[in-house]
Image (cartoon, coloured by chain):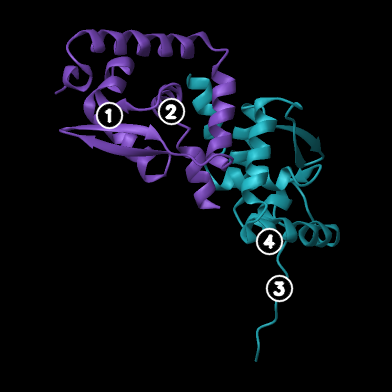
Chain colours: A cyan, B purple
Amino acid sequence: MRAEARFFKSLSDETRLKILWLLSGTEELCVCDIIDVLRITQSKASRHLRYLYHLGWVTDRRDGLRMNYRLCVLPGSSGEKLLKILEAMLASQPEAQALRGKLPRCIEAKQHAQCAGGLKPERKVTANPV
Amino acid sequence: MKKEAQLFKSLADETRLKMLWLLMGREELCVCDIMGVLGTTQSKASRHLRYLYHLGWVTDRRDGVWMNYRLSVAPGSPEDRQLKLLAEILSSRPEAQALRDRLEQWLAAKGQSKDGAAACQCS
């Protein structure tokens, strides 16, 4: 029953939960999208995404230096059922809704900024007020 | 979203998963039943049961020096849905079936040796 415990462990971490939540609301995300929305470091995002990858929750697609991830749970599988439970739990959560709400803005901003190698787009340098 | 992660974390441990699985098959279990079936120490069993208690998965009922536990999830709640999914996954696992069989044997043996709770090995 270790495999089952590991299965539930995928969602036992707040960051992984948020990543799956974001991915289940969209088709595909670049690592930098996740970094932007969750405000975490690239190493943390990549670590959790690789964890999810090795457990079979997501697949990856390399695009130059960038790595993109998408969910790959089979319809009717335990993974899909667990994600549906998560959806039901978070649907009424303002915090979860706010996260998804941030996503389009981050993706749009990315199109204007540089997004290479899954690195965070450079922050706008604000002039120091005199 | 910390609360949700915590809820999933309760199922992320093999011992807790087994305990919930055993409780799903019976109305109420004594700590000693769980110890006997899983072959764990009393401190480990109690620790995990208290963990499940504090997250609202189970309620307790004291009976002398022994503590009894039963599931306390509301029908239709996320916890209930998680348990149903767990039951669905485990129902095809021989290992999980063997655990339930062991529980039946354990309870039968306990019932034969004197009367119910008094026969509790640990009392």
Residue with the mark numbered 3: A125
Neighbour tally class for label 4: few under 14, some 14-19, many 20 plus, Cα within 10 Å: few
Please tell me which residue is depicted at 73% across the width and 70% down the height of the picture: A124
Residue A74 position within the rendered picture, expressed as x and y whole percent measured from the top left = 75, 26
- The answer to which of B109 and B36 lies nearer the viewer is B109
Please tell me which residue is depicted at 57% across the width and 29% down the height of the picture: B84
The kind of secondary structure element at disc 1 is helix
Residue B74 position within the rendered picture, expressed as x and y whole percent measured from the top left = 51, 42
Q: Is residue B106 above or below residue B75?
A: above
**Disc 4 marks which amino acid?**
Ala
Residue B6 position within the rendered picture, expressed as x and y whole percent measured from the top left = 48, 45
**Disc 1 marks which amino acid?**
Lys
Give the chain of mark 1: B
Give the chain of mark 3: A
Residue with the mark numbered 2: B20
In the image, are marks 1 and 4 on the same chain? no
**Disc 2 marks which amino acid?**
Leu
Look at the numbered discs 4 and 2 and tell me whether their residues touch, using CB distance below 8 Å.
Answer: no
Q: Is residue A99 visible?
A: yes
Counting residues from the start of the chain, the first of labels 1 and 2 encountered is 2
The kind of secondary structure element at disc 3 is loop
Residue with the mark numbered 4: A98
CA–CA distance between discs 1 and 2?
A: 15 Å
- The answer to which of B76 and A11 lies nearer the viewer is B76
Residue with the mark numbered 1: B44
CA–CA distance between discs 3 and 4?
A: 25 Å
